[in-house]
């Protein structure tokens, strides 16, 4: 039995201090720190962005209690499966807040969710966002949502709803956090499945745009902390003339359209797919493997982005640690039937992708192993 403990103040002087407005006859929501009028203005400011993402299946408009979406996209499928994913942007947001640049992190948000459900072969259908912010400012929210809208257009999904939550007293006024939710559909007979992977299959890598949205707690610690705004904005030769700020804020690539194009052009050629996120190649490629196979990755067969080299150098990371922290230049890896690998590469090239053959499937125990150790940065083109 739990003992109930009651605590009371012996005198008024022992009681906790109360806010000054507690002595007034009435307290409004605005006095408590939440401005509903500004919230309404923010909704109005994002309407055009939201409408630009709409697909024919969208029913109604934003502002209701729930987003409506027709399931007509599944009517011709043999056994349609809904696929859902949720994610955030993580501490990359701190770099955006420090830089005062908020128009790209929304792309990151969509990418992290849409790329995840793409790993099943699904077509993303619709997206919802959650913006938690210390002090709501319509212009700032519109900038964030503009990025989310751009991400949705790149992924081909509709932004059908979301939430803007003001958190006074819980978050600093300029602080915010983002969460996203994506739903897609795939026909079960065409779903990508690690159990279909076979020894001899080829690993085809697609380029990342940089760090994407992972490893930023480490990146910030070694590259941002202690730096002035001037230093972060300074062009750097080792980053190809980009500033550290801009290199760190390069948005995550969204692979939906090129990968969906190759799935359509080469049915059955892609066995499985790995989205390389937190945990790097080591802890994501294994998720696309059956229990009796390993992925053998040939280091040095693809270029590592300058920002990844820079951060790993600043942190003095060895190869093993780098490969399980960052994507190291591979945002997505396809496991491909060797008979059809050339057709897959051609379809990806037609869709605008540059590809590299980065390894193969061998007998094993569902793990990732590396050949050419010590050659991670040895790509020669």
Image: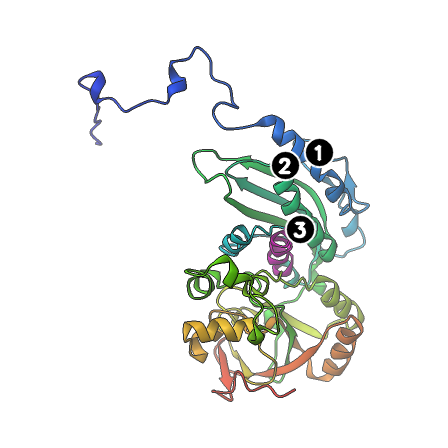
Label of residue 44 in the image: 1
Q: Are marks 2 and 1 in contact (CB under 8 Å)?
A: yes
Label of residue 251 in the image: none
Q: Residues within 10 Å of mark 1 (few under 14, many from 20)?
A: some
Mark 2 and mark 1: span between their CA atoms? 9 Å
Mark closer to the chain start, 2 or 1 = 1
Residue 199, compared with residue 7, is above or below; it is below
Which quadrant of the rendered structure holds the N terminus?
A: top left
Which quadrant of the rendered structure holds the C terminus?
A: bottom right
State the colouring used for the structure image.
rainbow
User: Looking at the magenta stretch, what is its main secondary structure?
Assistant: helix
Residue 112 part of the magenta segment:
yes
Determine whether, in the image, residue 3 is placed left or right of residue 212: left
Determine whether, in the image, residue 76 is placed left or right of residue 249: right
Residue occupying image coordinates x 54% and y 74%: 328
Measured as percent of width and height from the top left, residue 68 is found at 72, 38
Residue occupying image coordinates x 58% and y 60%: 249
Question: In the rendered structure, which segment of residues is drawn in magenta?
Answer: 103-116
Q: Residues within 10 Å of mark 3 (few under 14, many from 20)?
A: many
The residue at which mark 3 appears reads as: 147
The residue most toward the left is 10
The residue at which mark 2 appears reads as: 138
Mark closer to the chain start, 2 or 3 = 2
Secondary element at image label 2: helix
Q: Are marks 2 and 3 in contact (CB under 8 Å)?
A: no
């Amino acid at each position: 039995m739990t003992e109930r403990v009651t605590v009371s103040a012996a005198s008024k002087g022992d009681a906790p201090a109360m806010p000054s407005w507690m002595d007034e006859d009435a307290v409004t929501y605005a006095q408590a720190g939440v401005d509903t009028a500004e919230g309404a203005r923010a909704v109005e400011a994002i309407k055009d962005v939201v409408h630009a993402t709409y697909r024919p299946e969208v029913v109604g408009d934003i502002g209701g209690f729930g987003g409506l979406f027709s399931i007509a996209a599944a009517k011709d499928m043999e056994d349609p499966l809904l696929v859902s994913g949720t994610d955030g942007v993580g501490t990359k947001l701190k770099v955006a807040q420090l830089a005062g640049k908020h128009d790209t992190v929304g792309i990151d948000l969509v990418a992290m969710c849409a790329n995840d459900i793409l790993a099943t072969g699904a077509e993303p259908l619709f997206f919802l966002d959650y913006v938690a912010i210390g002090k709501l400012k319509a212009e700032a929210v519109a900038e964030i949502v503009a990025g989310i809208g751009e991400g949705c257009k790149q992924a081909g999904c509709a932004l059908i709803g979301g939430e803007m939550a003001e958190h006074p007293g819980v978050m600093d006024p300029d602080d915010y956090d983002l969460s996203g939710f994506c739903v897609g559909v795939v026909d079960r007979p065409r779903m990508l499945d690690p159990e279909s992977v076979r020894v001899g299959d080829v690993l085809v890598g697609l380029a990342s745009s940089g760090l994407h949205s992972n490893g930023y707690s480490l990146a910030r610690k070694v590259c941002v902390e202690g730096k002035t705004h001037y230093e972060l904005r300074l062009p750097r030769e080792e980053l190809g003339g980009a500033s550290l700020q801009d290199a760190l804020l390069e948005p995550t690539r969204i692979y939906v359209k090129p990968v969906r194009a190759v799935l359509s052009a080469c049915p059955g050629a892609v066995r499985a797919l790995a989205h390389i996120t937190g945990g790097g190649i080591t802890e994501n490629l294994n998720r696309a493997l059956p229990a009796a196979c390993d992925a053998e990755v040939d280091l040095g067969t693809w270029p590592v982005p300058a920002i990844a080299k820079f951060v790993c150098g600043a942190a003095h990371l060895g190869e093993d640690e780098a490969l399980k922290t960052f994507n190291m230049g591979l945002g997505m890896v396809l496991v491909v039937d060797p008979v059809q690998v050339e057709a897959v590469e051609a379809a990806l090239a037609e869709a605008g992708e540059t590809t590299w053959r980065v390894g193969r499937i061998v007998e094993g125990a569902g793990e990732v192993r590396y050949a050419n150790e010590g050659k991670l940065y040895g790509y020669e083109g």
